[in-house]
Amino acid sequence: MDEVEVVVAHDERATLRAGEVFVKIDGHPTRLATEVRAMHLAPIPTPEVLWHEPPALALSAVPGAALGVLGAPSEASPAAWAAAGRMIRRLHEAPLPPWPGRPLADVEAELEKECEWLLAHSPLPSELVVRNREIARGALEPRPPVFIHGDLQITHVFVEDDEVTGIIDWSEGGPGDAMSDLAILTLGHEERLEDLLAGYGTDVDRGAIRAWWSLRSLTAARWLLEHGFDPDAPDASSTCCARGCGSRRERSDRPCPGRAGLPCRSAELSPRCPPRRPARRCAHSRHGLRRLLVDTVVDPRGPPCRATRGTAVDLPRARPEQWHRSRE
């Protein structure tokens, strides 16, 4: 081991890498404990727990590479996606964990709160927010709970030789809607839904999957904006808070010059925070929030990505290549 690498760090948690060991530090009193319990109960490959001493958790690296990255086409084969589908099905058919899932009332409250914020601050066209809020409410219909991962981003599923080698980040595991896992995994990769279902099975509610796409996008939008991801910037790394302000923990109500009057993440306006270049409302923006949201009336009987723009808004919390074990 030559160095300790900071994989991700923000106000809620931090992850460090030392060789083949990852150490997660989380300020939430129960999140890491839930992660340990969920990995213990899940009948699918997960990282090995090396030790757990709150507020820290040490995990081993998993082999293979992430199924894909958000904001770019997945290079994984259809067989790898089908393998992921089979693994998710195995999880969903496992006995429910003994702790409660997130109440739908809490999900609905978060959706309404985030939509009101988006409408008040106008980072996205109001008609886009309103239309997607209506679609997202389809995710709030009660469905029989299953054992879900809860945050099944594409960067959390690792594969090698078209087989799943591990699924990471289980802090939101518990009882929930099976369609939410399928939606989160295919968010921004809607064209791979059929590959996923080839392994999972086709007895799914496609309308609910679409609803979860909209819900996930809307509830993630503010977090992305506050961490420096511009809804229309062609390159999110060029926004000011991705380069300067967002790297500090302090928060201020001062407007950030690169974020259209939104509060700056730093206590003082950092000299590292350059003015943002003029906004470009481009339908092909790499990390554009607008690209995922539905901009036409959804026909639940139609193809899975007919009414979406097709690029993820749920950006990874860590670079996926940092989570897999080197084979060199």
Image (tube, rainbow, N blue to C red):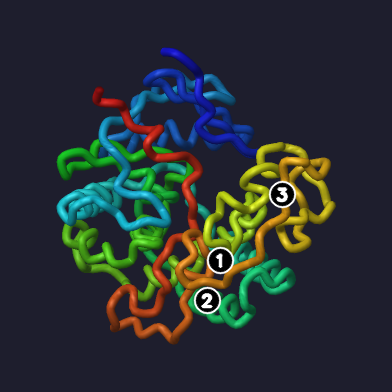
Residue mark closest to the camera, 3 vs 2: 3
Tell me the crowding category of disc 2: few under 14, some 14 to 19, or many 20 or more residues within 10 angstroms, Cα based. many
Residue of label 3: 274
Residue of label 2: 132
Question: Which of 233/29 is in front?
Answer: 233
On the image, which quarter does residue 261 sit in? bottom right
* 224 relative to 177 in the view: left or right: right
Residue of label 1: 218
Tell me the crowding category of disc 3: few under 14, some 14 to 19, or many 20 or more residues within 10 angstroms, Cα based. some
Question: Which of 62/315 is in front?
Answer: 315
The percent coordinates of residue 144 (x first, y second) are: 37, 62
Question: Which of 73/234 is in front?
Answer: 234
* 165 relative to 280 in the view: left or right: left
The percent coordinates of residue 93 (x first, y second) are: 26, 51
Q: Amino acid at mark 3?
A: Pro
The percent coordinates of residue 294 (x first, y second) are: 46, 77
**Total numbered labels:** 3
Q: Amino acid at mark 1?
A: Leu
